Amino acid sequence: MSEVSTAEAALVLDARAELGEGPVWDERGGLLLWVDISRHELHRFDPASSVDETIDVGQHLGAVAVRAAGGYVLALERGFGVLEAPDAGVELVAEVLPGGSGTRFNDGACDSAGRFWAGTYADDEAEGAGALYCLEPDRSVRRLLDSVTISNGIDWSLDGRTMYYVDSSTQRVDAFDFDAESGSIANRRALIEIPREGGLPDGLTVDAEGFLWVALWGGSAVHRYRPDGSLERIVRLPVSLVTSCCFGGADLEDLYITSAAYELTPEQLAAEPQAGGLFRHRPGVRGRRPNPYRG
C-alpha cells in the first residue's frame, strides 16, 4: 500500500458560517463564490483584499455556479434560479419541488456541456426522499436519480466519461458512466468507501491530475483519492464539519475549503472557534476551471 501523506489547511476568513458550502472559483473577477445555506447567503470572497461580500437571496441556497451569459445560476430551496448581477433580484427559472414538501436543494455543479446538476434531500434526512436533477441550457429539468438521501458532491473525470457523485448516507463516492452529449448516466458503482468513523463524504472536486478531493463532514479533513479510489493524501482542519472544496486563485493552485458550525453545542464551539470558517491549502497540484452554465 502506498504511503498516505498529511498536511494542514489555514484559515483565510473567519466567516463563522452556519452552513458554509459549495465553493466555486469565478475567474472573471478573481472571486471565490460560496454559500451559507441556512442563512440564505451567497458570498463573494476576494482573496486579494480579503473582502467577503454577502448577497441575501431570500431562501435556502444549496449551490451556485458561474453563468456563461453573466451572473450566476443557483440551486434554490425549491428549484433553480438565476441571478444576473449582484444587485439584481433572483429569477426562479424552474420550480421543481412543491411548497411544504420538507425537501430542498443541496450541492451542485456544471458539466462540460453547460448543464447544471443539483440534488435534494429532506430536512429530516428521511431515507430515499431526495433525487438528482439536471437543469438543461434551455431551462428544462430532468430527474436522473431517485431514492437519494443526502445529495452532495458532483464532478467529472478528466476525459468527461465518468461522473463522480456523493449520496452522503451511503458513506461512498460513486462513479457513473457519463455521456456528455446526451447528459445520461449509467452503470453506477462504488469507487470510494469511507468508514463511518471517518466522517460523512460531502462536497468534492477533481484536480488537473484526475485525483478526487473529498470533504468529510464530522471528519475534520479533506481526503485526496487516486482515480482508482485509493487514498493518497489527508488535509487536516481544526474544525469537524468540513463541507466542500474547490481550486481557485489565478493559477488554480489554492484549494479552498468551506466548513460549518451547524448545530454545534456551546462546548463544541468553544473547542472549535474557527468552525464555519473558510480555509485554504496549497497542495502543489492545480485544479481545473469550473464549467459554466450555458443557459
Image (spheres, rainbow, N blue to C red):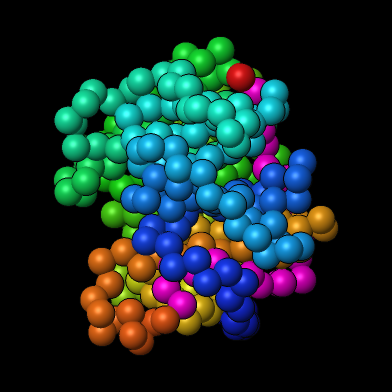
Q: Quadrant of residue 235?
A: bottom right
Q: Is residue 84 visible?
A: yes
Query: Where is the C terminus found, in terms of image quarters?
Result: top right
Which residue reaches farthest right? 251
Q: Residue at x 46, y 77 (%)?
A: 274
* Image position of 57 with respect to 79: above or below: below
Instruction: Between residue 152 and residue 42, name the one nearer to us.
Output: 42
Q: Quadrant of residue 40?
A: top left
Q: Residue at x 61, y 27 (%)?
A: 84
- Side of 93 relative to 95 (left or right): right
Q: Name the spot of residue 204 as percent of width and height, x first.
A: 53, 55
Which residue reaches farthest front? 87
- Side of 285 relative to 138 (left or right): right
Q: Name the spot of residue 34 as percent of width and height, x first.
A: 54, 51
Q: What is the magenta range?
A: 274-294
* Image position of 12 with respect to 79: above or below: below
Q: Residue at x 33, y 22 (%)?
A: 96
Q: Is residue 163 visible?
A: no
Query: Where is the N terminus found, in terms of image quarters?
Result: bottom right
Q: Is residue 215 magenta?
A: no
Q: Is residue 287 magenta?
A: yes
Instruction: Between residue 193 and residue 151, name the one nearer to us.
Output: 151
Instruction: Between residue 201 and residue 271, name the one nearer to us.
Output: 271
Determine the main secondary structure of the stretch shown in magenta: loop
